[in-house]
Amino acid sequence: MRQTLESAGLTVRQPRNGRSSRRPACGGRPAGPAVASAKAAPRYDRVVDEDLLDYYALLHRHFGPQDWWPARTRLEVMVGAVLVQNTSWRNVEYALQRLRAARRLSLPGLRATSAADLGRLIRSSGFWRPKARCLKALVALVDQQHGGRLDRMFRTPTAGLRAQLLALPGVGPETADNILLYAGGHATFVVDAYTRRVLDRHNLGPEISSAAAQPLPYETLRGWFEARLPRQAALYNEFHALLVAVGKQYCHKKTPCCRACPLRAKLP
Ligand code: SF4
């Protein structure tokens, strides 16, 4: 299902002792105030950004391969991508277990289950009514547009399939890109809150007007990454997973643990 980094032609240094078990020594130097880079409109240079790849290398050396997405099948990735909205992965795992135990974690299983029954099975993931409707819409897309076959669906060109996914109820850009990247192997970069936090604290990202107080649009950030990285699904896959890892372990919302973080040398 996944392309390996090596098959994508990307060489990375492995962690010296396998996957790191280091814990953050919190209380270290906090990052400076979140600073959104100011100035002009977003730039899209369309050149590989060695500095950004250096972030990737530092994270990969520290955390090791993340082997995302944690799922058994492509359909499980799709279901997980819907369920993880606005909740923790632990709650999603419980919902997936219930679906699996009820033999509903398959296309035929989801097809044969009403939205109401699905909702009962995924209740632990929160917002279960809209999420159940979203899952039914996802299955309808596979059936009506792609002959009921995931392999056919994921052979659709990225932009067209992305538009189909975004047209579904309850599917925003992050969910669509998770499905495209982690279930379909499409080279589309996923942006989430952890990504935004690391960019802000390191003065990275598109240049914006100093008057702009709004968070940068999702598509602006996705385009910024994609313009600076080799267009490789394996790289996007690992990079996003590594940004989540550093966000969870070190780059906490209130008090970042910069002293122990693998990106400390990159602080402005
Ligand atoms: S990514 Fe690491 S070094 Fe950078 S602000 Fe967050 S915790 Fe600090």
Image: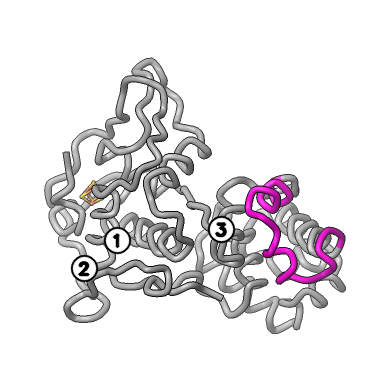
Residue 23: which numbered mark, if any? 2
Q: Earlier in the sequence, mark 3 or mark 2?
A: 2
Residue 110: which numbered mark, if any? none
- Which element is circle 1 on? helix
**Span colored in magenta:** 144-166
Is residue 140 on the magenta stretch?
no
Locate residue 202: give its quadrant: top left
Q: Earlier in the sequence, mark 2 or mark 1?
A: 2
Label 1 is placed on what type of residue?
Answer: Gln
Mark 1, residue position: 249
Q: Comparing marks 3 and 1, which lies closer to the viewer?
A: 3
Mark 3, residue position: 178
x 78%, y 71%: residue: 149
Residue 188 point in image, percent of width and height: 52, 53
Locate residue 123: give its quadrant: bottom right
- Which element is circle 2 on? loop
- Marks 2/1 in contact by CB < 8 Å: the verdict is yes
Label 2 is placed on what type of residue?
Answer: Arg
x 20%, y 71%: residue: 22
Marks 3 and 2, how far apart at CA: 28 Å
Q: How many other residues sit within 10 Å of disc 1, few (<14), some (14-19) or many (≥20)?
A: some
